Image (cartoon, rainbow, N blue to C red):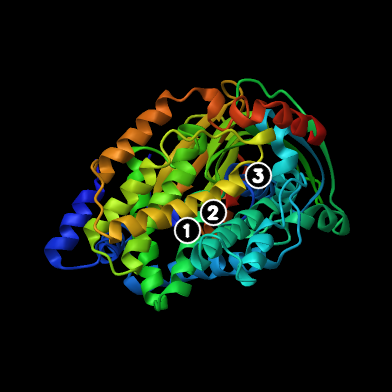
C-alpha cells in the first residue's frame, strides 16, 4: 500500500519539495515529460481560475433554484471591509461558494477530487495567491502536492461520497488543499502531512446527505467550510503544531468510518438532512 | 482497479453538477451515437433508478442529449442541448423505466439514424464520469470507451473469430480485451475487441470483406 509518509521521507532525504517528488513519480507512472504534465496541470489551473471568476459575478440559479448568488454576497461584504473573520478567510469562503455554485448551475469546473467538492482547492489556492507572492510554477507544483495526496487517499480509502460519505469528498479536498497550502506558504514536507492530517481529522464522520439527491444542499456551503478548515489546518501546521495521528493512519480511519457508515448516509438521500421535514418538502416540490 | 494518477484526482474538466449524473451521462450519449455510427434523428431514452429519480436536478437529460449530439463533458453548450437538438432536427422523448437488476445510473437508448440505422444501447454511469455499455441490440457487452473498439456482427461458426484476429495480428494491432457472445449456436454473434492501436480504413475494408462478417463498427475512444 502506498503511503504519503514515504513521499515525505523521500523529499526530506533528497532536500526536495513534496510536489517535486510526486511530479517525478508521475512522470514515471504516466511515462510523460515534466513539460507535458505541467501543460495539463496548467489547463486545470486555468479552468479553476475561470470558475472562481464566473461564480463571483454570476446571477445564475441552479436547476432546482435552491443555489446561486451566495458567493457574491460574501464577496460584496468583504469588499466593503466588513469581514468579521479577516479578508483572506472571507475571500476563501466567497471563492469556494463561487466554484461550487458554478458547478450546481451547470458551469465548467475541474473535479477536485470530485465535482461536489470542486470549490475547496481553487478557493485555497487563489486565496494564498492573494495573500502571498507565489509564482504560477509554484501554484502548479502545489497542485501536484494536492493531487498526490489524493492518490494516496483514493488508494487507501475513497474520494467518493457514495463509498465514504462527505468526509471522503470535502474531507479529502480539505486535506489535499491543506497540504498544498503549507507548501505554497513555504512549509516543510513534514508540515504538509501534518496539515493534511489535521484537516481530515476535522472532517471525519461527515455524512453525504444531499437534499433531493442534488449536489446543492448542503454541498455548496460545505465547500466553503472545507476551504476554511484547510486554511486553519495549514496555519496550525506552519506554526509547528503536529498531528498526533499521522496522515496515512488518519486516511485509513476515514476509510474505515466510511465502511461503517450506513447506506442511508452515503449519497442516497435517504438519511440526514435529506429526510428532515424541510428536506422532504424540497424534494416533493422539485420532483 | 488500476492505480489512479494526478489527473484522476484533479479532473476531469467538466460541466457540473455531477461526475456520474452529468459528465458520465454525456459520455453515455456520446458512446450511443458512436455505436449508431451516424447522425441520430429520432430516439427514445429510458431512464432507470437514480437517473430517473434525480436526473432532472443533475441535468442528466440535457447531458444525455448533449452526448447524442457529439459533445464532450466539458462543452459549455450542454445546458442548452435540448434547443440545439431541436435545431438539428433530432427528436427525442424521455421515459422512466425499470431496466431490471442493473446499476442505479442506467439508461437505455433506442435510436434511429438519418441513413436508416437503428440501434438499442444500454449503459451505466459507474462513478467519477466512467461508463460502461452493457447491451447493444440485446447482445451483452462490456464497453468502456477508453480504447479503440471494434464491434463486429458475424455468424457463429468455427474460424470466424480466427480470421478477424489474424487480420489484426498482420496489421500489428494488439488486442487488450475481447468478448464474444451469440444469440444461439450457428446464429448471429457479436465480437467486441478493444485494441491498443487504432485500425485504419484499409484494415476495416478488408475486415468487412471477410466471409460471414455482417457488420463492422469502429468506435474511437471517448
- Residue A182 placed where, x, y %? 33, 62
- Residue A49 placed where, x, y %? 55, 69
Q: Examine the rendered structure and indicate whether residue A222 appears above or below residue A206.
A: below
State the CA–CA distance, disc 3 to disc 1. Answer: 18 Å
Quadrant of residue A249 within the rendered picture: top left
Badge 2 density bin: few <14, some 14–19, many ≥20, Cα 10 Å: many
Q: Are marks 1 and 2 on the same chain?
A: yes
User: SS of the residue at dot 3?
Assistant: loop
Chain hosting mark 3: A
Chain hosting mark 2: A
Left/right placement of residue A193 relative to residue A123 reads left
Left/right placement of residue A97 relative to residue B177 reads right
Residue farthest along the left direction in this orientation: A13
Tag 1 near tag 2, CB within 8 Å:
yes
Q: Examine the rendered structure and indicate whether residue B91 appears above or below residue A20.
A: above
- Residue B134 placed where, x, y %? 59, 33
- Residue plotted at (27% across, 65% down): A187
Mark 3 sits on what residue?
Answer: A216
- Residue plotted at (75% across, 44% down): B61
* Residue A18 in view, yes or no: yes
Q: Examine the rendered structure and indicate whether residue A57 appears above or below residue B138.
A: below
Position of the C terminus of chain A, as image quadrant, is top right
Badge 1 density bin: few <14, some 14–19, many ≥20, Cα 10 Å: many
State the CA–CA distance, disc 2 to disc 3. Answer: 12 Å
Mark 2 sits on what residue?
Answer: A118
Q: Which residue is more in the foreground, A83 or A156?
A: A83
Q: Earlier in the sequence, mark 2 or mark 3?
A: 2
- Residue A205 placed where, x, y %? 44, 33
Position of the N terminus of chain A, as image quadrant, is top left
Chain hosting mark 1: A
Q: Do labels 2 and 3 share a chain?
A: yes
Amino acid at each position: 500500500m502506498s503511503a504519503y509518509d514515504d513521499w515525505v521521507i523521500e523529499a526530506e532525504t533528497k532536500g526536495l519539495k513534496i510536489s517535486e517528488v510526486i511530479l517525478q513519480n508521475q512522470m514515471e507512472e504516466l511515462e510523460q515529460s515534466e513539460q507535458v504534465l505541467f501543460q495539463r496541470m496548467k489547463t486545470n489551473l486555468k479552468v479553476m481560475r475561470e470558475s472562481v471568476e464566473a461564480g463571483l459575478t454570476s446571477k445564475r440559479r441552479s436547476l432546482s433554484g435552491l443555489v446561486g448568488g451566495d458567493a457574491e454576497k460574501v464577496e460584496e461584504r468583504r469588499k466593503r471591509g466588513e469581514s468579521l473573520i479577516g479578508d483572506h478567510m472571507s475571500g476563501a469562503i466567497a471563492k469556494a461558494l463561487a466554484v461550487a455554485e458554478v458547478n450546481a448551475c451547470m458551469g465548467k469546473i475541474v473535479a477536485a477530487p470530485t465535482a461536489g467538492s470542486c470549490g475547496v482547492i481553487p478557493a485555497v489556492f487563489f486565496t494564498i495567491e492573494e495573500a502571498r507572492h507565489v509564482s504560477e510554477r509554484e501554484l502548479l507544483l502545489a497542485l501536484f502536492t494536492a493531487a498526490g495526496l489524493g492518490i494516496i487517499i483514493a488508494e487507501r480509502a475513497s474520494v467518493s461520497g457514495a463509498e465514504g460519505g462527505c468526509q471522503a469528498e470535502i474531507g479529502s479536498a480539505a486535506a489535499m488543499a491543506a497540504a498544498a497550502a503549507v507548501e505554497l506558504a513555504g512549509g516543510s514536507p513534514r508540515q504538509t502531512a501534518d496539515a493534511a492530517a489535521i484537516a481530515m481529522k476535522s472532517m471525519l464522520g461527515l455524512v453525504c446527505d444531499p437534499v433531493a439527491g442534488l449536489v446543492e444542499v448542503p454541498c455548496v456551503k460545505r465547500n466553503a467550510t472545507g476551504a476554511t478548515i484547510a486554511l486553519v489546518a495549514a496555519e496550525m501546521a506552519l506554526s509547528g503544531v503536529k498531528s498526533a495521528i499521522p496522515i496515512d493512519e488518519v486516511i485509513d480511519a476515514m476509510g474505515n468510518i466510511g465502511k461503517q457508515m450506513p447506506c442511508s448516509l452515503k449519497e442516497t438521500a435517504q438519511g440526514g438532512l435529506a429526510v428532515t421535514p424541510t428536506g422532504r418538502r424540497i424534494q416533493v416540490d422539485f420532483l | 482497479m488500476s492505480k489512479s494518477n494526478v489527473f484522476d484526482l484533479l479532473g476531469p474538466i467538466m460541466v457540473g453538477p455531477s461526475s456520474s449524473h452529468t459528465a458520465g451521462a454525456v459520455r453515455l450519449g456520446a458512446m450511443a451515437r458512436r455505436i449508431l455510427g451516424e447522425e441520430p434523428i429520432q430516439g427514445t431514452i429510458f431512464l432507470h433508478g437514480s437517473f430517473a429519480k434525480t436526473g432532472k436536478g443533475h441535468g442528466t437529460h440535457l447531458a444525455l442529449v448533449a452526448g447524442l449530439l457529439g459533445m464532450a463533458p466539458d462543452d459549455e453548450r450542454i445546458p442548452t442541448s435540448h434547443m440545439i437538438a431541436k435545431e438539428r432536427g433530432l427528436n427525442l422523448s424521455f421515459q422512466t423505466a425499470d431496466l431490471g437488476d442493473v446499476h442505479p445510473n442506467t439508461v437505455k437508448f433506442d435510436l434511429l439514424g438519418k441513413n436508416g440505422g437503428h440501434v438499442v444501447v444500454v449503459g451505466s454511469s459507474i462513478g467519477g464520469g466512467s461508463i460502461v455499455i452493457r447491451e447493444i441490440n440485446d447482445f451483452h457487452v462490456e464497453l468502456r470507451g477508453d480504447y479503440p473498439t471494434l464491434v463486429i456482427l458475424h455468424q457463429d461458426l468455427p474460424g470466424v473469430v480466427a480470421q478477424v484476429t489474424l487480420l489484426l495480428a498482420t496489421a500489428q494491432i494488439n488486442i487488450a480485451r475481447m468478448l464474444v457472445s451469440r444469440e444461439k449456436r450457428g446464429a448471429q454473434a457479436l465480437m467486441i475487441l478493444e485494441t491498443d492501436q487504432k485500425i485504419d480504413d484499409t484494415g476495416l475494408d478488408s475486415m468487412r470483406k471477410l466471409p460471414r462478417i455482417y457488420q463492422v463498427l469502429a468506435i474511437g475512444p471517448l
